[in-house]
Amino acid sequence: MSALPSTLRALAVALALVATAAHADVLRRFALVAGNDEGGGDTRPLRFAQDDARKFHSLLQRLGGVAPGDAKLLLNEDSKDFLKALAELEARTREARARGERTALIVYYSGHAKDGSLRLGDSRLGFEDLKRRLSEAPADMRIAILDSCRSGTLTRTKGARRAPAFEIESGAARDARGLVILTSSAADEDSQESDALGGSYFSHHLASGLLGDADRSGDGRVTLFEAYSHAYARTVADTAASSAGPQHPTFSYDLAGNGDLVLTDLRASGEGLLVPGAAPAGLYYFVDPGGMVVAELDKTVDVERRVALAPGTYRVKRRLQDRLRIGEVEVPRGRATVLEEARLRDAPFSDDPVKGEARDGGAWWTVGLSGGVQSFLDAPTRDTLFLSVGLLGAEAQLHDYFRRDWVWGVDVAVGGKQAVLALPTLAGPAYRYSVTSLGTTLTAEWPKGRITPFVGGRMAYLILRRDFDDDAFPDQKFSMFSPGLVTGLRWKPLSRVHLTGQARLHYLQYTVDEQRSLGYWELGALLTYQP
């Protein structure tokens, strides 16, 4: 009888030890993700830094084990906001460690860097200050991922490498402690963006690797060093022929203990796409509805691969020697789907679903059709003199010719309606009121993914006519140059199709029978195509 209590006590102790070990093996992850397209007056705005940050923030929560409450996303914030957010995560990390939890702090930044500092808008954060802050952070593991020009300055210390050929003992991350820094470029190199990829080369290939392309072991998990090695090789390959030259990511690590940190678990969400072992070998591209490559997968013979795509519809592309093989696949929520080769078809290269602008700094243009309404501001004018009318027109726009993100446009629109002239004592004659508008605009825009706000100036030549049905009344015509302002949003639902909503406010001087200052507004929509 006495043996039973001792057995129970031993079992209780064993369970307690297992529970303690399991608790110690859990790695609580905190993430600060920042993207800033602006770097101050002496830099040119980036196009995709904020988009890269949004993608990485979502990826860490969906597959990277970071709880939504433990992740902070900063978009176009300054260095004070960055340091404040970092301090908040450090405080939470300290509290977690006090409860016996092992912790990891991941800091990702996409944006400008220059003269030894991150450039967050008009503010600065020195490389050495950031490195010191990360070195002193209370987390067991600190991982910094910096996608910016000359970010390799941070790794020019003992232990730094420019190539990914290194070994670290694989195993549980429970034994690893220290600081790891990954950068998108060497200390003397620029980091490059790609319009076709809709992001920077480095962040795209890092994210694609974390979605599954870097999982060379096939265990369904992507480790930190698997992801870096993949991003290094693909970034160098893709930028080798660019005008800026090859871009070499760097790393620096100062780790104690053994083990490699798993950054993403491809099975965490239960959803994604399986490419079976029987599928042909080759490089697969997965393209979103906007024509941007969201992931790539290098498939080898007889090896099953998994890419953890978020739920949605994707175009699949595999390039053959003389043609493409393309198709469409739906990734449902909560479960994986298998890519079936029979659902792909052969197509000429001209049907390539990857439709990035690929301008490489060059100009591009769009043409389109517009519709809208014009109305003068004061009621007496629009009721008796210049009536409110609908407009139909056409517009052509030249993008990035004078300066990046500047758009010069020319437009023409016509409109009209039947009306009756209001006379004091009797019904007036019938006439047709017509408007012809010829305009040119110069706008500045700020691309934010598929949405692009813009604002600028416009000069219009306005021709207003009243053509009477009764020949006893002479036709009337008024024409005048009219300066104005224009603002709006351009949306890109497809790679080469843009839908724009815009508002214009104009001024003109009426000089026929008296001097009058008049204003009018126009609201319209523009559907354009990029050849």
Image: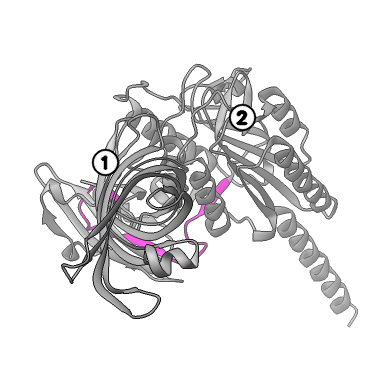
Q: Position of residue 35 (x, y in %)?
A: 57, 42
Q: Amino acid at mark 1?
A: Trp
Between the residue at mark 2 and the residue at mark 1, the CA separation in whole angstroms equals 31 Å
Which residue is painted at 27% across and 38% down in the image?
364
Q: Is residue 338 magenta?
A: no
Identify the residue under disc 2. 119
Which secondary structure lies at badge 1?
strand
Query: 471 or 344: which is nearer to us?
Result: 471
Identify the residue under disc 1. 365
Query: 205 or 521: which is nearer to us?
Result: 521
Q: Where, by quadrant of the figure, is residue 104 drawn?
A: top right
Which residue is painted at 44% across and 71% down in the image?
333
Which of the two labelled residues, at mark 2 and mark 1, occupies the earlier sequence position? Answer: 2
Query: 284 or 243: which is nearer to us?
Result: 243
Quick check: 305 left or right of 180? left
Which residue is painted at 64% across and 24% down in the image?
117
Q: Position of residue 169 (x, y in %)?
A: 56, 36
Furthest-right residue in this view: 2
Q: Which mark is residue 62?
A: none
Q: Position of residue 178 (x, y in %)?
A: 69, 34
Image mark count: 2
Q: Position of residue 251 (x, y in %)?
A: 55, 28
Q: Please state which of the two labelled residues, at mark 2 or mark 1, is closer to the viewer.
A: 1
Here the colouring is one colour
Mark 1 is surrounded, within 10 Å at the Cα level, by few (under 14), some (14 to 19) or many (20 or more) other residues, namely: some
Furthest-bottom residue in this view: 1
Q: Where, by quadrant of the figure, is residue 473 drawn?
A: bottom left
Quick check: 68 left or right of 501? right
Which residue is painted at 66% across and 25% down in the image?
127
Q: Which residues are magenta?
A: 262-285
Mark 2 is surrounded, within 10 Å at the Cα level, by few (under 14), some (14 to 19) or many (20 or more) other residues, namely: many
Quick check: 125 left or right of 95? left
